[in-house]
């Protein structure tokens, strides 16, 4: 039952991130939870943070988050990538698009 309480899981993710804002696993799990809450923009933003912190798909939790998140809102991924390029983050944008393209 506790694994189905996504709102509580989100609260716990937010708390964990506030305590350790550089922890890639917390952002990956937050992306996973946000996707189940149908908060696709927040989920994708979490993945952007994962990339910015140096995370990659070799991490189990990052891989799971990528698989779940990219099943919900691909249009926002491309818009996010475009915005990232505008603010001088092409490497982050490229990785985000690479992850999406690998799962299409």
Image (cartoon, rainbow, N blue to C red):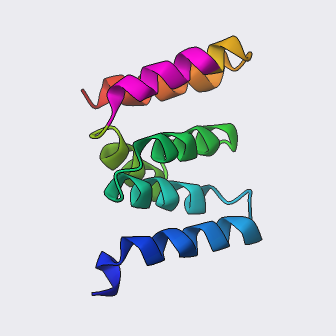
- Rendered residue at 63%/43% (across/down): 49
Residue 71 left/right relative to 37? left
Q: Extreme bottom residue here? A: 1
Residue 31, magenta (yes or no): no
Residue 81, magenta (yes or no): yes
Image quadrant in which the C terminus is located: top left
Which quadrant of the view contains residue 32? bottom left
Image quadrant in which the N terminus is located: bottom left
Q: How many marks?
A: 0
- Rendered residue at 48%/20% (across/down): 79
- Rendered residue at 36%/44% (across/down): 69
Q: Give the range drawn in magenta.
A: 73-83
- Considering depth in this image, is 64 or 6 the residue closer to the camera? 6
Rendered location of residue 82, percent (x, y): 55, 14
Residue 50 left/right relative to 69? right
Which quadrant of the view contains residue 7? bottom left
Residue 101 left/right relative to 12? left
Q: From this viewpoint, is residue 93 visible?
A: yes
Q: From this viewpoint, is residue 94 visible?
A: no
């Amino acid at each position: 039952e506790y694994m189905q309480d996504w709102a509580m899981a989100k609260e716990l993710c937010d708390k964990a991130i506030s305590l350790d804002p550089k922890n890639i696993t917390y952002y990956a799990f937050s992306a996973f939870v946000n996707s189940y809450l149908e908060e696709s923009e927040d989920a994708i933003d979490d993945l952007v943070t994962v990339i910015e912190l140096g995370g990659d798909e070799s991490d189990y939790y990052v891989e799971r988050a990528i698989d779940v998140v990219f099943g919900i809102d691909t249009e926002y991924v491309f818009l996010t990538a475009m915005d990232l390029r505008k603010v001088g983050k092409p490497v982050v944008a490229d990785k985000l698009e690479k992850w999406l393209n690998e799962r299409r």
